[in-house]
Image (spheres, rainbow, N blue to C red):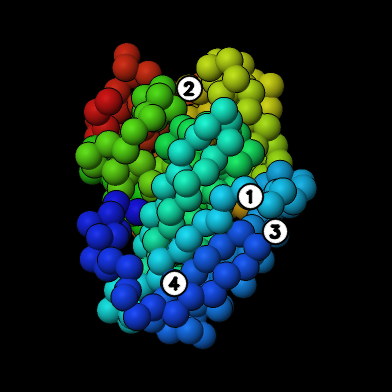
Amino acid sequence: MDARVRCMVVLTAVLSMAASHRTANFLVSSDDPLLARQVAEEAERYRHQLAISWLGQELPRWQDICPIQVAAGNRLGAGGQTSFTFEEGRPGHWQMFVQGSRQRILDSVLPHEITHTIFASHFGRPLPRWADEGASTTVEHISERRKQHHLLVQFLTSDRGIPFHRMYRIKEYPQDVRPLYAQGYSLARYLVSHGGRRRFVDYLETGMEGGDWDLATRQHYGLSNLSQLQLAWNSWVQRGCPSPEKTLPLDPLVRQASAKIPATRSAADASGWRRRNSPLLVPASPSRLPLAIRP
């Protein structure tokens, strides 16, 4: 789920006295029999509902059962990890670990990890990291999504933003992974709010098929290239990320930067002004570096 959890994933081996509950696609182990049942039932529900939401149809039953290990505790940070392999475009050898409070496991960690399995089943190969983690974060509880939004603002104002031309090429988790999560979530949320989940999936299919993300961006979102997408996203972030879903409060740093943009300038002049002066901008290309961000 987040880098904050990767070091915690190893804290619990399979509990020797764990209870288990099996459904059509999942085998859940927990030291709490009731929680094992809840996680298994919710995993099936999320798998059904999120597949329809993202793909427009249910997934067929997996050939391999997906084991889920659960470590629940109010002092455990919310997080999880899902691993699998691809064989001829089919994922298998599933392994999933979830941890956190009972509430966060059920309303955030589990839907996040299940979304990974839905994408793996649909695409049959790894997704760009920003898209896989970003889209999976959009289905978490609003409290977890707010955390990512506030982290995004911190990263974009402290020289840790990732230019899109680099972010789209990231295939492995970088050492400084938290900006990738926050920025990936924000971009996924932006794209979903401007066309829905089905269009987002179609966009990934087009971009992954030919590797031409400028073409995919043009075809599905009407923007000429990734640089234009980045400028549009930057503007959206500065406006407080408005969307049909519940809008996050406008962070004071975002409000301050946004208020400096002259409303009467032309689009071309305004975008140039933002590149020179806004600390919130990630550079659209190596030749256009704002003061606060480096590629």
Q: Which residue is mark 1?
A: 62
Q: Nearer the viewer, mark 3 or mark 4?
A: 4
Q: How would you rate the neighbour count of disc 4 (Cα within 10 Å): few for under 14, some for 14-19, many for 20 or more?
A: many
| Secondary structure beneath label 2 | helix
Q: Amino acid at mark 4?
A: Ser
Q: Residue 45's spot in the image, x, y percent?
A: 66, 66
Percent x, y of residue 254: 39, 50
Q: Nearer the viewer, mark 4 or mark 2?
A: 4
The residue type indicated by label 1 comes to: Trp
Camera-near label (2 vs 3) is 3
Residue at image location 24% in from the left, 28% down from the top: 294
For residue 239, above or below residue 231 = below
Q: Earlier in the sequence, mark 1 or mark 2?
A: 1
Quickly name the residue at label 3. 48
User: Marks 1 and 3: in contact by CB < 8 Å?
Assistant: no
Q: Nearer the viewer, residue 2 or 68?
A: 68
Q: Residue at x 25, y 60 (%)?
A: 10
- Residue 225 position in % (x across, y down): 55, 19
